[in-house]
């Protein structure tokens, strides 16, 4: 397959911002700004010529991983930057491939997951199923004073009042509109955007969450929300929980990250804190970190480290689905939060298991 990538040099006078944010205009045509990166004042961009409408054709699923990564590794993205000294022009041979294949799209990695969360009956069922299972396990837990869901809780807990601990995001609150914004604007997650979303207090409750939480509350079982939202958005989070759950939530029920010096990303210290006064009967979360801390380890190590806890799955630890983000994804890029979008994509391609013959596989160790 004939495919060329051409490197050319421009001065900034040859480039004009286009009214559409995904497009740039050169003096010989309009191009998609595929991605751009500025290093030491010089911006490199990848452009694709535009016979097609926005959101189509520059990314071909027929591109191999190595071809993709070759370009991406040397030219990182920051779409929207128009001051450049040189650029990569993906030539007609690539465009031709894009037009000739069925599966050719500009896509966003969050698109499928976000649409699934927002529309799929199956997502709804999984959430409700989790909370219905929690009903059953809660009843069992209440009848067995030896039952504790927290591995941090090791002794003298039998007579303590019971408590349920829930994570917040994608466990109680559905932040898929925030993800939908990232997709629709084709921008990366930033803490600033996340904080803005949190302060809006707009998230609705996950399917099944309100019913379960109200029921727990009516039984006078303590409820704690242990979240890695930063303490700076605690008030907004309380307001959001109260509105979405249609019940008052008190400040002492919400334990945010950094609220105390020892309350870090690991939730262990917060579970220990609650375990001093309560028998923790259930943990509900969408991330394994909501149950126990297994460190910043690789994807494969995560699976291994989870195995010893299998007796907790579906009994004392209730897992909700989250295809959008989480430590499962962070582990793919080594918890390096500055990893660029293209590099993340490359790493995900490397993890694909195709069951092809060994000689045809790429990027597997
Ligand atoms: Mg969560």
Image (tube, rainbow, N blue to C red):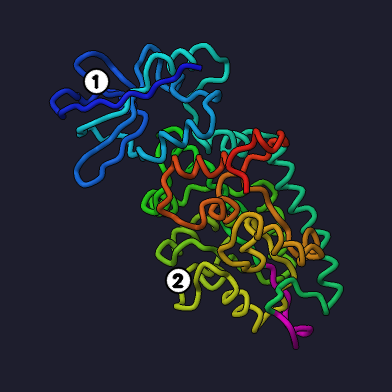
Q: Is the magenta stretch mostly helix, strand or loop?
A: loop
Image quadrant assignment for residue 58: top left
Observer-nearest residue: 197 or 187? 187
In the rendered image, the residue lying farthest to the left is 13
Mark 1 residue element: strand
Q: Residue at x 68, y 52 (%)?
A: 320
Mark 2 residue element: loop
Residue 94 sits above or below residue 341 on the image: above
- For the residues carrying marks 1 and 2, which lies nearer the camera in this image? 1
Q: In the rendering, at what x and y percent does residue 144 appear?
A: 86, 75
Q: In the rendering, at what x and y percent does residue 14 appear?
A: 16, 23
Q: Which residue is drawn at 47% across and 25% down?
A: 59
The span shown in magenta is 153-164
Residue 258 circle label? 2
Residue density around tag 2, few if under 14, some if 14–19, many if 20 or more, within 10 Å = some
Disc 1 target residue: 25
Q: How far apart are marks 1 and 2 (CA)?
A: 46 Å
């Amino acid at each position: 397959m004939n495919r060329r990538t051409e490197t050319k040099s421009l001065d900034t006078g040859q480039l004009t911002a286009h009214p559409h944010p995904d497009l740039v205009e050169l003096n010989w045509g309009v191009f998609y700004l595929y991605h751009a990166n500025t290093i030491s004042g010089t911006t490199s961009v990848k452009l694709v010529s535009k016979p097609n409408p926005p959101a189509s054709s520059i990314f071909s699923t027929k591109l191999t991983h190595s071809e993709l990564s070759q370009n991406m590794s040397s030219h990182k993205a920051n779409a929207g930057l128009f001051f450049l000294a040189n650029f990569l022009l993906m030539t007609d041979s690539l465009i031709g491939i894009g037009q000739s294949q069925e599966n050719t799209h500009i896509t966003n990695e969050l698109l499928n997951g976000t649409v699934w969360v927002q529309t799929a009956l199956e997502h709804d069922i999984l959430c409700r199923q989790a909370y219905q299972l929690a009903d059953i396990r809660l009843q069992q837990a209440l009848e067995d004073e030896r039952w504790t869901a927290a591995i941090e809780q090791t002794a003298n807990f039998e007579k303590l009042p019971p408590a349920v601990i829930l994570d917040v995001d994608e466990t109680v609150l559905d932040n898929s509109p925030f993800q939908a914004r990232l997709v629709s604007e084709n921008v990366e997650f930033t803490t600033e955007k996340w904080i803005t979303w949190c302060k809006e207090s707009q998230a609705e409750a996950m399917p099944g969450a309100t019913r379960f939480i109200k029921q727990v509350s009516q039984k006078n079982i303590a409820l704690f929300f242990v979240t890695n939202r930063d303490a700076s958005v605690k008030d907004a989070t309380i307001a959001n929980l109260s509105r979405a759950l249609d019940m008052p939530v008190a400040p002492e029920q919400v334990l945010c990250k950094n609220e105390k010096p020892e309350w870090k990303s690991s939730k262990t210290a917060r579970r220990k804190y609650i375990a001093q006064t309560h028998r923790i009967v259930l943990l509900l979360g969408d991330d394994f970190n909501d149950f126990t801390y297994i460190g910043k380890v690789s994807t494969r190590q995560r699976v291994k480290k989870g195995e010893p806890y299998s007796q907790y799955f579906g009994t004392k630890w209730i897992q909700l689905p989250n295809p959008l983000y989480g430590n499962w994804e962070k582990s793919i890029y080594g918890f390096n939060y500055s990893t660029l979008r293209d590099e993340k994509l490359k790493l995900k391609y490397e993890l694909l298991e195709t069951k092809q013959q060994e000689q045809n596989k790429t990027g597997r160790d």
